[in-house]
Structures are given as structure tokens and as C-alpha cells.
Amino acid sequence: MSITFDRALGVHPQAVALRLSRAELLAANLANVDTPNFQAKDIDFASEMQRSSRSFSQSTTPQEMYRVPYQPASDGNTVSLNVEQAEFAKNTQDYQMSLAFLNMKFTGLKQAIEGK
């Protein structure tokens, strides 16, 4: 019986890719904090992971959602600097953890191949 990378690595490659997509969205939100009428976007990580696990394609595009502002700005911008910075920091920590899990999977595979 052969083993594939998809089976060996589990959900970790999808998690890393999704966290990267979310980081790009959050960075765009932060970059446009002063842009009039800019609408902040985000990804629901849990639902996107479920959707990607049901999908046969590894490269599904995550569904972006508009963030509901706590207090709307007079210029129509929905980016809250504090919220975006906190979400970006949390996503960065989660991204690092996903990379650590992926690294552990590769280490385990390497040890199995080497017979250790």
C-alpha cells in the first residue's frame, strides 16, 4: 500500500494556504485604513477548512466576507485599526503553529523513511 502526501500531511497544507490568504486580506485592510468607502474583508477560517476538506480540489478560493464594523466611519470605511491589528497578530500566531505542525509531519516522514 502506497502513501500519498495528501494522506501523510493531513489538513496542514490547506491550513497554511488558508492562513496565508487570510494574512493577505488582513494586510489589505490595514493598508486601506484611511481609504474612503473601503470595506474590510475577512475569511471564516473554520468554515473554509470544512469546505476545503469536502472539496476534491486542493486549490479552492476562500469566500471573502465583509466585516461588520463596530462603529461606522463617516467616510464609509469599515476598517477598525485595533480590530485588524489584533486579527492580524492572531492569524500570524496561528500561521506559525500551522507551519510547526507541518514541520513535525515532515520530520516524522523523514524518520520513517530513514527507519529511525
Image (spheres, rainbow, N blue to C red):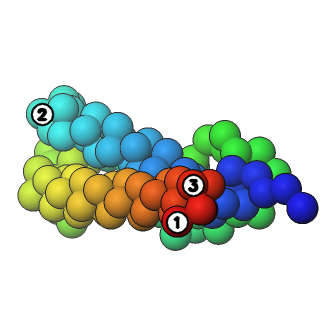
Give the structural element (helix, strand or loop) at label 2: loop
Give the amino acid type for the residue marked by disc 1 in the picture. Answer: Lys
- In this view, the residue in front, 108 or 66, is 108
Point out residue 70 in the picture as x, y percentages from the top left corner: 21, 66
- Crowding near the residue tagged with mark 2, few <14, some 14–19, many ≥20 C-alpha atoms within 10 Å: some
Name the residue tied to disc 1: 116
Residue 34: numbered disc = 2
Q: Quadrant of residue 1?
A: bottom right
- Crowding near the residue tagged with mark 1, few <14, some 14–19, many ≥20 C-alpha atoms within 10 Å: few
Give the structural element (helix, strand or loop) at label 1: loop
Residue 72: numbered disc = none
Give the amino acid type for the residue marked by disc 2 in the picture. Answer: Asp
Name the residue located 25 percent from the left edge and 54 percent from the top edge: 92
The answer to whether residue 20 of the structure is visible from this angle is yes
Give the structural element (helix, strand or loop) at label 3: helix
Instruction: State the CA–CA distance, disc 2 to disc 1.
Output: 55 Å
Question: Which badge, 2 or 1, comes first in the chain's sequence?
Answer: 2
Look at the numbered discs 3 and 1 and tell me whether their residues touch, using CB distance below 8 Å.
yes
Name the residue tied to disc 3: 114
The answer to whether residue 15 of the structure is visible from this angle is no
Name the residue located 52 percent from the left edge and 60 percent from the top edge: 111
Name the residue located 77 percent from the left edge and 63 percent from the top edge: 54
Question: Which badge, 2 or 3, comes first in the chain's sequence?
Answer: 2
Query: Against 34, is 112 above or below?
Result: below
Point out residue 98 in the picture as x, y percentages from the top left corner: 40, 60
2 or 1: mark nearer the eye: 1
Instruction: State the CA–CA distance, disc 2 to disc 3.
Output: 54 Å
Point out residue 65 in the picture as x, y percentages from the top left corner: 48, 53
Q: Left or right? Give the position of 5 relative to 107.
A: right
Give the amino acid type for the residue marked by disc 3 in the picture. Answer: Glu
